[in-house]
Amino acid sequence: MNAGCRPCMETTDRQKLLYEISKIDFVLKELNLYLDTHPYDQQAMASFRQYNTLKNKLVKDYTEKYGPLVLSCVDMDSREWKWAIQDWPWEGGYN
């Protein structure tokens, strides 16, 4: 395999992870809306907890590999504000 293809593979992995996060986020928003009108539905609440745990894990994985995706994941012990210096997912410059 050519070393020049590695960034292509990383881009694909990054895009896949972002896509998974966005799918889980959509499910959470829908469950949130449902629970607003059905606040005692135990099955929906269990599903919300399950998907929320999964989203938190995926966001943590993304943060470890590519930098913070949300402000709550910014490393406050770092000597630099990584939030401002990372490549944004929509910029396409995955270095």
Image (cartoon, rainbow, N blue to C red):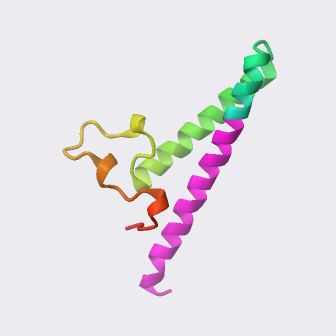
Residue at 42% from the left image edge and 83% from the top image edge:
3
Q: Give the side of residue 77 with respect to residue 31, left or right.
A: left
**Residue 62, percent across and down?**
48, 50
Q: Give the side of residue 33 with respect to residue 72, left or right.
A: right
Q: Give the side of residue 93 with respect to residue 77, left or right.
A: right
Residue at 38% from the left image edge and 59% from the top image edge:
87
For residue 66, which quarter of the picture?
A: bottom left
Residue at 80% from the left image edge and 23% from the top image edge:
43
For residue 27, which quarter of the picture?
A: top right
The quadrant of the picture occupied by the C terminus is bottom left
Per the picture, the main secondary structure of the magenta-coloured stretch is: helix
Residue 75 falls within the magenta-colored stretch: no
**Residue 57, percent across and down?**
54, 41
Q: Which residues are magenta?
A: 1-28
Of residues 30 and 14, the one nearer the viewer is 30
Residue 20 falls within the magenta-colored stretch: yes
